[in-house]
Image (spheres, rainbow, N blue to C red):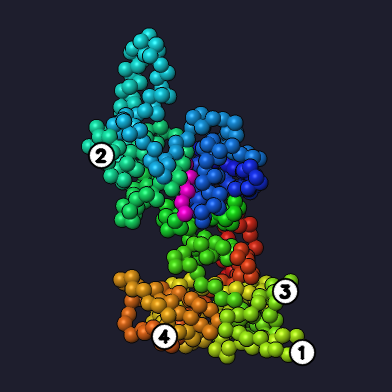
Amino acid sequence: MAQVLLEKVTKVYPGGVRAVDGIDLAIGDREFVVLVGPSGCGKSTTLRMIAGLEEISTGTIRIGERVVNDVPPKDRDIAMVFQNYALYPHMTVYKNMAFGLTLRTLPGPLWRITHPGESRKLRAGIDSRVREAARMLDIEHLLSRKPRQLSGGQRQRVALGRAIVREPAAFLFDEPLSNLDAKLRVTTRAELKRLHQRLKTTTIYVTHDQEEAMTLGDRIVVMNDGVIQQADTPLNTYNRPVNRFVAGFIGMPPMNFFDGTLRASGGGLSFEEGPPPGRSPAGRDGAIGPAPGAQETVSSGPPELTLPPERFTLPMAQLSPGALARLGKWVSKNVVLGVRPEHLHLRPPAGELADAREGGVEFAPMRTTVNVIEPLGNDMDVYFKTSLHDPVVARVEAQSGLRVDAAATLYVDLRKVHLFEPGETGMNLSLETTSPATEPAHAIA
C-alpha cells in the first residue's frame, strides 16, 4: 500500500486544450477515493497520468516516496481495471489472471531451463495467488473458460482478479461498471466495497455516476473543467457543497435553484424570489436579468421590471448569528437559493409540527402548480412550477390526490437550504470560508 500525491499536476494537449489544470490531491494509504464529474472534466486523464498512460505537462506525481513522472507504467506498482475489461480472448480465465505475474517473475525460456527448481516454486506461488483471488471473487468454477463464454459481470470479476493477484501499491479503476446492467452494477458495487475492506489497498476510482461515488468512496473528488471543485467525505459533499456546481451535480434528482434577492426583515434575513425590481440588465454587483414571467414597461426613462405578485418569500430563520453577519453585505443583492428535492414536502413532517407551532419556523410554504408526476414505488418525483421557476422537483412519499395543473403548497425545510453567489460555480454563502480542493467544508451553525 502507498500514498498517492499529486502536486500542481497539469495536462495540456496540442492546440492548447487544458484537460487538467494544476490540481493538488493527496490520497492516503489504504484510502478509497472516487474522482467524479461530467464527461470532459479531466477525471480519466488524471487517472491515466497516475498510471503513466498519459505524460503530465507540469507538476509532480508521487506513489509512496517515489516520484514517478518518468517511470514507465509497468514499474509504477499499480494495477488498472478498464471499462472494457481488456481480457485476452484466446486465453482461459486462469491464464488471463496469471499472465501479468508470469511476465514479471519468469523473464525467459533460458532462465527457466537453467533454474528449473526456482521456476517450479514461482509457478506454485502464481497458482496459489490466482486461486485465492478466484475464491475471493467466486469465479473458481470459471478458471478453464474463455472470455467469450462469460457474462459481462463475470468478465468484470476476471479483470478484478487479474489486478488483485498483482498485489499492487494502488488499484486504479476507470469506470469499470459502466458496461453492466443496472441490477448487476449494484451487486458488483457492493462486491468492490467489500473487496476494499478486505484488501485495504489504496484505490482510485473514476466514474461519472454520482451514486457510485457516494456509495463507494471514503472521499469524493468532484471535478469540472480540469479543476477540483471539492474533495470531501460523501456526506459532507452532499450536505455542505462548497459551490453551486457541486450542489447541482451531487444528488439525484439535482438540487433546485431559485434566483432571487436577499432582504433584511424583522432583524433577520429573507429570500425573495426574482431579481430586484427595476434592475433588468446584469450588473457588476451580480444582478441578473428579467425573470421568467416578468415584463418590462416601456417608458422614456430607465426600464422598470414588473414581477408577478405570486412570487414567494422565505424567512432565513435557521441561519446562525455568524452566517447573518457574513450575509449582511448581500442584502438587496441577487443570490441563488438551493433546495434539494427531498427537502421539499407536501406537508410538514408530523413530528416537526409541534416544534413549528412553538415558535421555531422550520418549514415555510411555497405556492406552486403541479406539472408532472413520476411514481417510483414507495416515493414519487413531482415536478412543480412557481410563477418564476420551472421546473421545481420534489421527492415525496407516494400518495394519491395530486393532479396535473392543480395548485399545491410545498413546505421548504429551512434547516436544509443553501444560499449561493450568482453563477454556475457561485460559492456557497451559507458555509464557513474554506478551500474546496483540499479541506472539508464546515457547517455554519
Mark 2 or mark 3: which comes first in sequence? 2
Pointer 1 residue: 300
Mark 3 or mark 4: whose residue is earlier in sequence = 3
Secondary element under disc 2, as helix, strand or loop, is helix
Q: Amino acid at mark 1?
A: Ser
The CA distance from mark 1 to mark 4 is: 39 Å
Q: Which residue is mark 2?
A: 149
Q: Which residues are magenta?
A: 200-208
Dot 4: what SS?
loop
Q: What residue occupies the far right of the structure in this picture?
A: 301
x then y, percent, for residue 75: 51, 29
For residue 182, side relative to residue 47 (left or right): left
Residue type at tag 3: Gly
Cβ atoms at labels 1 and 4 below 8 Å apart:
no
Q: Quadrant of residue 338?
A: bottom right
Q: Which residue is mark 4?
A: 405
Mark 4 residue type: Asp
